[in-house]
Image: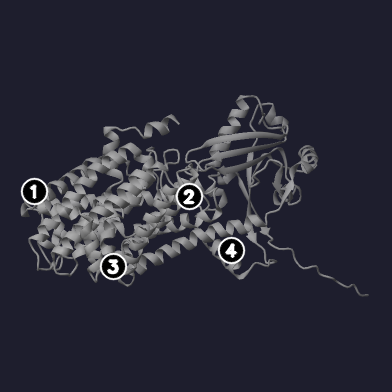
Amino acid sequence: MANHKDLHRLSAAGLLISLGIIYGDIGTSPLYVFKAIIGDRIISTDLILGGLSCIFWTLTLQTTIKYVIITLRADNKGEGGIFSLYSLVKRRARWLVFPAMIGGASLLADGMITPPITISSAVEGLQIFSKDLPTVPIVMVIITLLFIIQQFGTSHLGRAFGPIMFLWFGSMAVLGAIYVFDSPFILKAINPYYAWHILYDNPSALLIIGAVFLCTTGAEALYSDLGHCGRANIRVSWVFVKTCLLLNYFGQGAWLWQHQGATLGEGSNPFFLIMPVWFIPYGIGIATLAACIASQAMITGSFTLISEAVRLNLWPKVRINYPSIQKGQLYVPSMNWILWAGCIVVILLFKKSAAMEGAYGLAITITFIMTTILMSVYLMRKRFPMYFIVIFALIYGLLELVFLVGNMAKFFHGGWFTIMLSMVIFSVMWSWAAARRIKNRYVKFVEIEDYYEIISDLSEDSSVPKYSSQLIYLTSANFKSEIEAKIMYSILQKQPKRADVYWLVHVDVTDEPYTLEYKVDFLIPEKLIRIDFRLGFRVEQRINVLFRLVVEELVRNGEIDITSKYPSLNKHHIVGDFRFVVLEKVLSRSNRLSLLERLTMAYYFILKRFGLSEEKGFGLDLSFVTVEQVPLIVTNTDTVHLTRVD
């Protein structure tokens, strides 16, 4: 808890880390937002003032009030993000898993657009010097290198992110402020009338809403990275970041004011056009670095999201590596290359950042709506006044529905791609969770106390060959009084397994992120021992290591003796051998599942082939593991009446 409290303390280092980690996406939005608002339209007073007013109030209502002020309060022992929020409220109702899965899937899908659109927008600045410069190969090379370096860890690079982003925001602020000081009247766009006017009177209002929404797409990252930066550091650094962003947006607006009646030419971007000519090469370089940092933040966030989904049983078990000792630094190989493939497809499909704007934003709008639903339940759990909860849900429910409708106009312009990706990712999450519920529904438990005498007798029966000195089973039984019938069948009937000591290991994933607790129950003294681990949803389930640590502590305390019982080995105090038995459930043919359940289970077993096996998923040493397949009988077979004839 001390660390949890320290996390939220304000510090200069924390502020710099916040700049480097969480503002990559929202901090690079000036690269493409105003370009998307103007599009191929004629630059006009209404378009400039209305666009600026929409940007200002979107950043204020959506990013500042909803996320920075309200949502950051929902920290789970210092951790944030949609799955952390779900962990805080999931006991309120089972259906809350659906907004969590939909939000997580949409976040991952839209994340595949972040690297292509940000890096493309930056690299396309080079077309100011050469209109025909092919940017696609350059972008593909940069993105490929970015994904290759993930396996080596990015902790050393991360130290440079803060200063680079400080330079980025400072440069944007100065460039924008020059135009704002020359044309201070542009600040009148803060008046919400201009936002209302353009959205009410303009026939392209939906397209403008979809473009404006791009200015806040990184807001979810502020909450997701709560555990890395702390609430106070995020809130204070956001004041600086928002000021820099608004100065740049208003500077672009002042430049556009001077070019009313014209259109933005092919490849023209007001972000680069407000720069002095001599500064453009440096600006493109800084923009490219900032775009890479934004992409890195998305990749890291995706790794964290998948690792949490695995712990919460919403994703197949996949390999998770820890390339450095830095907290939160992890690498998910399968997700890394899935994201890379998605990014390459986006680049080849859309080619230019202007085309990618149509695909960007639609799916993340759904994530915002799901966060609003979960946050409303959290506010109820915290007993906030009902009028406050109703106002929060209504304002942000309506606002985000308007953004959703606006972004739906992008559906045929590329939005279909992220929606399709979201549906694929959601199908994986839903099928994995649903199949687990189906399996658990038909797992039969028996009273373990009924088998105490049999287990004791088997352990002492020298006529049965000893299977192992210490025999360990993983059990899903939540109560120490129960055990799966299949485990007892494995011990007693499927090649009777004599052992000196039988162990039952149960893992309970808690709603908190970093819980590391265990409890030991001696069911039969020196014969049958149960260990219950309570692990946080962000803790790696290395059962092999954790089990060994517990056994070592029990030995030190004199609670158990693991010395081999073989006389020749016992005389020399040799430790007995350990063996894990993992029961792998396979679907039996004798079942009466519905069509939907059969399809779900078929999809589940396909996914399981691509994921880690049970023994690898729990971090077991494969040289000490036996895997036994047991049929998952989901219904009793019909009673068959046979007639004997002579």
Q: Earlier in the sequence, mark 2 or mark 1?
A: 1
User: Could you say where residue 205 lies in the image, as x and y percent from the top left?
Assistant: 26, 67
Callout 3 secondary element: helix
Judge by depth and name the residue closer to the eye, 76 or 457: 76
Residue where numbered disc 1 is placed? 181
Q: Earlier in the sequence, mark 4 or mark 3?
A: 3
Relative vertical location of residue 303 with respect to residue 636 in this rendering, above or below: above
- Label drawn at residue 377: 2
Q: Residues within 10 Å of mark 4 (few under 14, many from 20)?
A: many
What is the distance, in whole Å, between disc 4 and disc 3 at their CAs?
A: 41 Å
- Label drawn at residue 206: 3
Task: Give the position of the N terminus as an image quadrant.
Answer: top left
Residue drawn at (58%, 43%), measured in percent from left and top?
507
Residue 123 falls in image quadrant = bottom left
Residue type for callout 2: Val
What is the distance, in whole Å, between disc 1 and disc 3 at their CAs?
A: 32 Å
Residue where numbered disc 4 is placed? 601
Callout 1 secondary element: helix
Callout 4 secondary element: helix
* Residue 352 shows in this picture: no
575 sits left or right of 168 in the view: right
62 sits left or right of 570 in the view: left
